[in-house]
Image (cartoon, grey):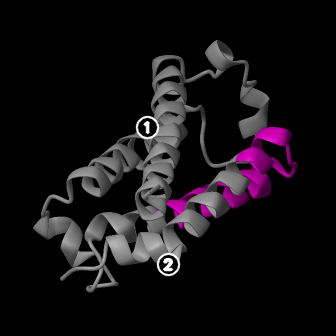
Amino acid sequence: MVNIKGKRSHALIILQAFLAIGALAGGTMLITDPSGELIGMPSSLLQDSFFPDYLIPGILLFCVFGILPVITASGLILRWEWDAAQRFNIFKEKHWSWTFSLYSGFELIIWIMVQVYILDSVSFIHLVYAMLGLIIQSATMLPSVQAKYTMQ
């Protein structure tokens, strides 16, 4: 018999890992080369923003969408206790990693919306990552996933 609940939570962990890998790579490249040339992003894209280069966006990308999803994925796998994270958990009946997974979907959608606003344009990659945010939220909200991360 196939454990559907386990498969769905595995998918959520994979989504968090996918987000983390892309953000760690992209963030590292933007931190290493704040001009954006390393990944083919012209500095002209920032002309109407409050960033002189890609350093701050790279740090945010690395930390918020790289490190935090790694921590979230590890929490989803190991269900380890973390008092600091629990303080930010608005769903006290759920493990903090479940809540942080939901947060990451919101963060990603907001990040993309801000990018689209600043750049005043939408590219294919924006659509992909906005969809990823929605998929993360949907996978997090599945009843079987919620049940798995409900505190006893």
Closest to the observer, 18 or 84: 18
Q: Nearer the viewer, mark 2 or mark 1?
A: 2
Bin the neighbour count of mark 1 within 10 Å (Cα to Cα): few under 14, some 14-19, many 20 and up: many
Position of the N terminus by quadrant: bottom left
- How far apart marks 2 and 1 lie (CA) works out to 31 Å
**Residue at the disc numbered 1:** 62
Query: Per the image, is 127 magenta?
Result: yes
What percent of the width, then of the height, locates residue 103? 46, 67
Closest to the observer, 81 or 25: 81
- Please, which residue is most extreme toward the front here? 1
Q: Which residues are drawn in magenta?
A: 104-128
- Magenta part mainly helix, strand or loop? helix
Query: Per the image, is 90 magenta?
Result: no
Bin the neighbour count of mark 2 within 10 Å (Cα to Cα): few under 14, some 14-19, many 20 and up: few
**Residue at the disc numbered 2:** 143
Closest to the observer, 111 or 31: 111
Position of the C terminus by quadrant: bottom left
In the image, residue 6 sits, relative to residue 25, either above or below, namely below
User: Which residue is at 14% across, 63% downward?
Assistant: 82
- Please, which residue is most extreme toward the top here? 38
Question: Are dots 2 and 1 in contact, CB under 8 Å?
Answer: no
Q: Secondary structure at mark 1?
A: helix
What percent of the width, then of the height, locates residue 125? 77, 40
What percent of the width, then of the height, locates residue 105? 55, 62
Number of marks present in the image shown: 2
User: Which residue is at 60% across, 42% downward?
Assistant: 51
Tell me the amino acid under the disc marked 1.
Answer: Phe
Tell me the amino acid under the disc marked 2.
Answer: Pro
Q: Quadrant of residue 35?
A: top right
